[in-house]
Amino acid sequence: MKNVRSLILTLVIALACAGSAFAQAQVAIGVKGGLNFAKLDGTSVDGTFKSRTGYHFGAFGLIKLSKIGIQPEILFSQQGSKIKTNTGDFDANFSYINIPVLIKLYTVAGINLQAGPQFGFLSRAEIDDNDVKDSFKKSDVSLALGAGWDLPFGLTLDARYNLGLSKIDDTSTADKVKNQVWQVSVGYKLIKLGGGN
């Protein structure tokens, strides 16, 4: 009987603590967009990859508990590269639907560090306006690393580097080709519940 009472008391205390934590949590939904500085990285391509500028836009959610936040996003992202070879220059234009899931560590005044996996799904692949989507993998995995600033009036600023972890092309002329993308973003929290920035 004493064990049952102890178990119930422990359960009540745990639920009270969890309820208190979630009562102080911030939940937000917003939109964001910005610039991409993308480049492919390969080890056996007959040529060199140069950066190309694109854009990204989409939506994000945020669950913030004190100094830790979880932020899933869904983004349309223009990626790819400029390719310089001995026979000429080419534009590789790729579009992805990316789903990053970030852990955010808040420091002071809404400034935060970010890290987490990103899962990408190829929606378009063209080289000099020629459709080459069938030559590339339909999915991509990256590691997203960055920093941000959540301002008190709902505005968010982010700078992020997405390091490709998976090969996007299996052909013999382009083995180990991966995505690399620098992103700068501006966002706005459309819906915000709870405290914090």
Image (tube, rainbow, N blue to C red):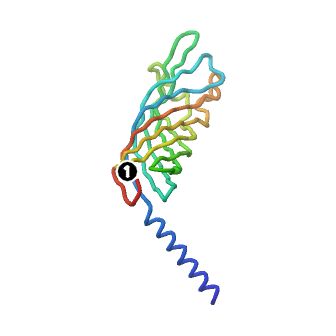
Front residue of this view, candidates 8 and 149 = 149
Q: Which residue is drawn at 50% across and 69% down?
A: 18
In this picture, is 129 found above or below 134? above
In this picture, is 181 found above or below 147? above
The residue carrying mark 1 is: 152
- Toward the bottom, the furthest residue is 1
Q: Residue at x 56, y 37 (%)?
A: 140
Q: Position of residue 97 (x, y in %)?
A: 46, 39
In this picture, is 74 found above or below 129? below
Local crowd size for mark 1, using a 10 Å CA cut-off: few (<14), some (14–19), many (≥20): few
> How many numbered tags mark residues here?
1
Relative placement, left or right, of 183 versus 44 is left
Q: Position of residue 100 (x, y in %)?
A: 50, 44
Relative placement, left or right, of 189 versus 16 is left
Q: Residue at x 61, y 36 (%)?
A: 166
Q: Where is residue 84 in the image (x, y as percent from the top left)?
A: 55, 15
Q: Position of residue 121 (x, y in %)?
A: 50, 38
Quadrant where the image shows the N terminus: bottom right
Instruction: Place residue 3 in its image quadrant.
Output: bottom right
Q: What residue type is labelled 1?
A: Pro
- Toward the top, the furthest residue is 87
- Toward the front, the furthest residue is 108
Q: Which residue is drawn at 48% across and 30% down?
A: 79
**SS for tag 1?**
loop
